Amino acid sequence: MADPPDNDLVQRTRQGDHDAYGALVLRYQTAVFNVCLRLLGNPRAAEDLAQEAFLRGFQRLDSFDNQRPFGPWIRRIATNLCLNHLKRRQPSTMILSEELDRPQSSGETDPVRVLVRSEQARTVREAILALPPHYRAVIELRHFQELSYAEIAETLGISLGDVRTHLYRARKALSRRLKSLD
Amino acid sequence: MTDQTHPPEWMFHAFLDDELAAEGRREMEDHLAACPECAARLDELEALFITIESQPQTPLSRDLAPAVLHEIRKTPSVSFRLRWIAGLELVATALLLALVPSLLSESLSSLTVGIRPPLGLSLLALQAWLVRAGGWLALGRGALFPWSSTAPERVELWLWALLPMAALWLLANAVLLRTGRRDSRTTK
């Protein structure tokens, strides 16, 4: 039996079926966790905020437009939560354990290639986390959530000009850092 | 743009982000076709984008659904109907708060007749304060209700207006309490 579509699960949640919301959590929890992890760098904090994002999403479900996709909406809630978290406190110490560097199965079997991929991923992750929070945010929203410049501006409450500037500077900083680590 | 004048850096970014208007996009494409240097710069930028976006997903160490559902079930949700009732109750409460002090002041004014100071003065001061408080709550600072200095029959009229509001307020409370008890039973 095919999985029910998201808008079906949202509708059932609104009618009081909490298990339907549980299905939505299962469907999007990895993506939301990775949004938080890319912004915060700390897996424990990322799990906590990912959980909080789903709770906020449940509270705001009445205002969600069920004609639109659920995934981008919940990811945006997670992004805003993480940005508020970063504003309130110093970013917590990055914990780049071996555990984090183990990607989901990509079908790659050659151990050398797996190791190289893993190292590359770690390098890029460190480079993104080394960016200031507002540069990290635009990179996350543009490259991982595929928002347009206008949508990024609206999400972050900044001008279009600032979005372009931040993206340009963030990418330049990333490029410089990745080249220096080569 | 010509071969000799290269586009500004931001245009390369906007081109790859698909954020250029149609005309700008066309100009960029024409220039890239004629300028190997800019074409190479674009390729380098595109390679950076691919590197950034090729980040694999990190798996979660635990399933979040049980904890999320546990929190949701702890807090009973407030239905749309209840929110409306709560809203009506707020309105009724605000009106009661605005009207009652002024009406009380009318009652006090009859009590002050024949009572000597200092008690008489205190009651008059309280009456004045009540009128002002009632007017301020409803209409803003300094406002006075029309019945502040009117005949008792007007006061009676306003009392009749108060009774349904008080009844509405009590009924809304009863519905809220009953529904709240029922909701907390179903969420357990």
Image (cartoon, grey):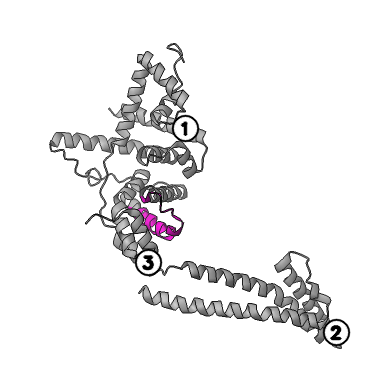
Query: Which mark is first along the chain, 3 or 1?
Result: 3
The chain under label 1 reads: A
Label 1: how many Cα within 10 Å (few below 14, some 14–19, many 20+): some
Secondary structure state at the residue bearing disc 3: loop
Let me know if marks 2 and 3 both belong to one chain: no
Tell me: residue A33, above or below residue A124.
Answer: below
- Kindly identify which residue carries mark 3: A16
Residue type marked 2: Pro
Quarter of the picture containing the C terminus of chain A is top left
Q: Nearer the viewer, mark 1 or mark 2?
A: 1
Residue drawn at x 32%, y 34% as measured from the top left: B52
Residue extending furthest toward the top: B4
Tell me the magenta residue range: A47-70
- Measuring from the top left, give residue A111's x and y in whole percent: 13, 37
- Kindly identify which residue carries mark 2: B117
- Kindly identify which residue carries mark 1: A164
